[in-house]
Image: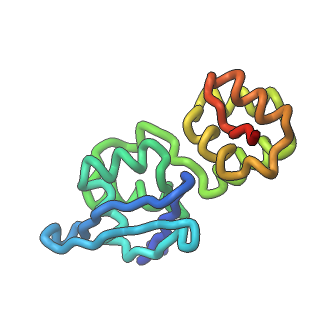
C-alpha cells in the first residue's frame, strides 16, 4: 500500500530550515523548521516529493541533514512520479538514529569507532561533542581535539 504521508527528521544538531513546495503546485511554499524540540514533521506525499524538486533541499537530503522515515518508499515514489530520474538514489540516506549512534560511541569512548566517524563526518562529531561535553570522558575529548586540531573544551582559570 502506498504511503500518503512521510515523516521527515533532522539528523544533525541545531535547527534545520528550508523552503518546500509540493509537486502538485510549485507556486505554493512552506517553511520547514526542524528543531531540537521538534526534530520531525509529517508531510503529505506531494510535499515530501518536493524535496526532489529543489536542488538546495535535495542537496541537504544528500548530505544527511535530514532523512525520511521510509527513504526507500519515498525514492520509489519519486521515480514513479518522475521527480527523480534513475532506478535508485546515488547515495545512502542517513538513518534517523545516526546522531544517537555517534553520541553512544562518544560516551562509551570507543576509540576505533570515534576515529571512523571523524573520518566520515568530522564536523558533525565535533558539533555533537561540543553539545554533550559534560557527558564525555577526558580521554574522548582529548582524542577528538588531537585528531581534529580543534579545541572543544574551554579551560576555566
Q: Position of residue 81 (x, y in %)?
A: 27, 61
Looking at the image, residue 54 sits to the left or right of residue 70; the answer is left
Query: What's the image's color scheme?
Result: rainbow
Q: Position of residue 28 (x, y in %)?
A: 18, 74
- What residue is at 49 percent from the left and 46 percent from the top? 64
Looking at the image, residue 76 sits to the left or right of residue 70; the answer is left
**Above or below, 111 relative to 18:** above
Total tally of numbered discs in the picture: 0
**Above or below, 156 relative to 149:** below
**Above or below, 140 relative to 52:** above
Residue 3 appears in the rendering: no
Residue 90 placement: quadrant: top left
- What residue is at 77 percent from the left and 35 percent from the top? 141
Q: Position of residue 73 (x, y in %)?
A: 47, 61
Looking at the image, residue 125 sits to the left or right of residue 81; the answer is right
Q: Position of residue 124 (x, y in %)?
A: 58, 41
**Above or below, 1 relative to 19:** below
- What residue is at 47 percent from the left and 50 percent from the top? 65
Residue 81 appears in the rendering: yes
- What residue is at 57 percent from the left and 66 percent from the top? 36
Residue 85 placement: quadrant: top left
Residue farthest to the left? 27
Along the viewing direction, whichever of 149 and 74 lies nearer the viewer: 149
Residue 153 placement: quadrant: top right
**Image quarter hosting the C terminus:** top right
Along the viewing direction, whichever of 99 and 74 lies nearer the viewer: 99
Amino acid at each position: 500500500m502506498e504511503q500518503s504521508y512521510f515523516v521527515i527528521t533532522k539528523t544533525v544538531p541545531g535547527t534545520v530550515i528550508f523552503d518546500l513546495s509540493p509537486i502538485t503546485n510549485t507556486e505554493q511554499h512552506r517553511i520547514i523548521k526542524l528543531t531540537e524540540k521538534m526534530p520531525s514533521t509529517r508531510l503529505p506525499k506531494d510535499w515530501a516529493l518536493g524535496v526532489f524538486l529543489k536542488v538546495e533541499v535535495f542537496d541537504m537530503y544528500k548530505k544527511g541533514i535530514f532523512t525520511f522515515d521510509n527513504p526507500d518508499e519515498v525514492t520509489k515514489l519519486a521515480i514513479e512520479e518522475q521527480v527523480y530520474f534513475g532506478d535508485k538514489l546515488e547515495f545512502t540516506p542517513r538513518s534517523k538514529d545516526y546522531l544517537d549512534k555517534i553520541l553512544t560511541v562518544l560516551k562509551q569512548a570507543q576509540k576505533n569507532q570515534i576515529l571512523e566517524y571523524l573520518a566520515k563526518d568530522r564536523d558533525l562529531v565535533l558539533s555533537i561533542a561540543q553539545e554533550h561535553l559534560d557527558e564525555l570522558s577526558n580521554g574522548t575529548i582529548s582524542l577528538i581535539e588531537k585528531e581534529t586540531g580543534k579545541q572543544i573544551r574551554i579551560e576555566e582559570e
